Each structure stands twice: as structure tokens, then as C-alpha cells.
Image (cartoon, rainbow, N blue to C red):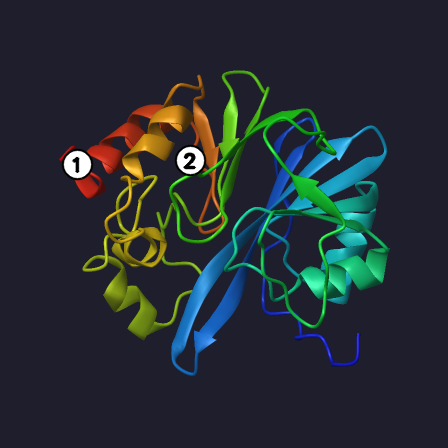
């Protein structure tokens, strides 16, 4: 694609959450002194793998990933997560799925458009936020109890793994320390001045039944996720 891909950052080994559901947590450099965490979700459908919130892994990490199946699809749920999609699409020859208007790096182009009434490369439901400034989607997998997958719309910074001291110090003041947090930076970046509240989008998500939440940041939230997300909505997006 005419430019070098970003190198892999330090990451954990792949963690299995269910028979065909996995995550891997990685570090990501936001700025010279700001290191944060990212989480890639891996869904297996037969012999194929779907990567959500893509993260480049080390050679050892990709060997572990390849042992799970063949990477066939990459889903970009959030507009801010674009750094490693070009590598994953190039390395695996994978199909890139993204919402209308999604922005990509290194000349990458959306191959399949994500839409609520369109096909998906896995068994899931999709909600595309209607009132956000930038494209963002949320998936629900039909696992026991239900699993919701977000990118940045809800985050779960439940521990300090992979953070730098500067980033760690900012988590509380910026609203990241709640379970299933809706952070203030995300709210500020995604709200349309004078437009409808993002609360209306989260009301649709909360209509789903789900116990677990996997976000683009932090560990999986196992059990009680819907109640935690409702509390975050009430805290960060109160009714006007």
C-alpha cells in the first residue's frame, strides 16, 4: 500500500472466552508518553476467523492466532481504530468491513459496508449509532447470556495493564474508571452540537439482552454488563 505498516506492540497471549470467542489485549502508543491498552476480539465461524477492532500481533502472536483458524474478515467498528487494519488486510488477504463514512489508514478502502439490515460475516446483530459525529457500531453475539462488542462507545479500563503512568493518571478524571465506561473524551468527540443525545443510541443497545461486554479497551466484563452500561449511560449521558 505504499507505506510501512506500524510495528506490533507488546501484547498478551490470546484469551478464550467461549468455544468460538477469544480476545487479545495489546499496548498502543497514543503519544510519546501516553501508552494505553487495546483489545481485539476474535470470533471463529467454522474454520474461519473474524477479527473485530483489529490489532497487529508479534510473529508468535500471529502463530497463535493462525492455530485457531483462517483469518477471513476484519470488522472496523470504531472510526478511531484504524492503525493495524491495513496490515491485517494485506497479511491475510482479509475482507474489510466498515460503516459508511469510515476513515482508513494507508489508502485502505472498505470492501463490504456494515449496515443494520445487511449481511454480516458472523452470526450477530449490529447497531450503527445514528446520532454520533463519526461512524461507530456495536455488535451482539448470541452467546449464553449474550455478548455485546463495542469499540470506543463503551470501554472497560478495569486494570492498569499496558498503561504508562501518564495515561493511568488520566483515567479517573476523564471518566474511564467505571465498568463499561462512556468516557468524557468519547462523548465530546462524538456528540453533534445541538443534535440529538447519544443517549438515544444507547437506549437501543440496552434493549438487547446481554450479560457480557467486550470493548476495544481493557478486559472482558463478564456478568452484569447490561446493568453496568445502564449506570454509565445515566452517569455520562443523563436525561435532559
Q: Provide residue 35's location: percent of width, then percent of height.
A: 43, 71
Quarter that holds the C terminus: top left
Count of numbered marks: 2
Q: Is residue 182 left or right of residue 239?
A: right
Quick one: label 2, few (<14), some, or many (20+) residues within 10 Å?
A: many
Residue 238 disc label: 1
Quarter that holds the N terminus: bottom right
Residue 32 disc label: none
The residue that label 2 is drawn on is 221
Disc number lying in front (1 or 2)? 1
Can you say whether 10 is above or below 31 in the image? above
Q: Could you tell me which residue is drawn at 63 percent across and 26 percent down?
A: 117
Give the image quarter of residue 87. Answer: bottom right
Can you say whether 18 is above or below 69 in the image? above
Q: Is residue 210 left or right of residue 10?
A: left
Q: Could you tell me which residue is drawn at 69 percent across and 26 percent down?
A: 19
Q: Could you tell me which residue is drawn at 17 percent across and 36 percent down?
A: 238
Q: Provide residue 32's location: percent of width, then percent of height.
A: 43, 83
Depth order, front residue of 214/13: 214
Whole-angstrom CA distance, mark 1 to mark 2, is: 23 Å
Q: Secondary structure at mark 2?
A: loop
Looking at this view, name the residue that lies furthest to the left.
240
Q: Provide residue 142's location: percent of width, then percent of height.
A: 59, 19
Regarding residue 141, the answer to whether it shows in the image is yes
Depth order, front residue of 11/40: 40
Can you say whether 185 is above or below 177 in the image? below
Q: Are marks 1 and 2 in contact (CB under 8 Å)?
A: no
Q: Secondary structure at mark 1?
A: loop
Q: Is residue 68 left or right of residue 104?
A: right
Amino acid at each position: 500500500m505504499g507505506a510501512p505498516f506500524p510495528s506490533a506492540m507488546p501484547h498478551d497471549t490470546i484469551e478464550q472466552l467461549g468455544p468460538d470467542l477469544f480476545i487479545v489485549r495489546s499496548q498502543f502508543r497514543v503519544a510519546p508518553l501516553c501508552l494505553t491498552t487495546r483489545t481485539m476480539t476474535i470470533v471463529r465461524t467454522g474454520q474461519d476467523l473474524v477479527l473485530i477492532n483489529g490489532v497487529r500481533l508479534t510473529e508468535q502472536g500471529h502463530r497463535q492466532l493462525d492455530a485457531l483458524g483462517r483469518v477471513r474478515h476484519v470488522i472496523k467498528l470504531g472510526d478511531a481504530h484504524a492503525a493495524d487494519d491495513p496490515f491485517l488486510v494485506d497479511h491475510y488477504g482479509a475482507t474489510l468491513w466498515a460503516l459508511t463514512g469510515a476513515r482508513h489508514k494507508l489508502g485502505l478502502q472498505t470492501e463490504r459496508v456494515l449496515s443494520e439490515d445487511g449481511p454480516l460475516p458472523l452470526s450477530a446483530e449490529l447497531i450503527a449509532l445514528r446520532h454520533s459525529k463519526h461512524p461507530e457500531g456495536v455488535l451482539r453475539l448470541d452467546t449464553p447470556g449474550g455478548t455485546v462488542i463495542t469499540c470506543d462507545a463503551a470501554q472497560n479500563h478495569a486494570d492498569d495493564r499496558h498503561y504508562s503512568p501518564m495515561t493511568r493518571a488520566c483515567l479517573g478524571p476523564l471518566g474511564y474508571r467505571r465498568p463499561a465506561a462512556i468516557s468524557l473524551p468519547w462523548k465530546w468527540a462524538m456528540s453533534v452540537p445541538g443534535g440529538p443525545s447519544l443517549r438515544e443510541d444507547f437506549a437501543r443497545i440496552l434493549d438487547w439482552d446481554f450479560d457480557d461486554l467486550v470493548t476495544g479497551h481493557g478486559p472482558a466484563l463478564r456478568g452484569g454488563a447490561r446493568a453496568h452500561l445502564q449506570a454509565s449511560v445515566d452517569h455520562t449521558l443523563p436525561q435532559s
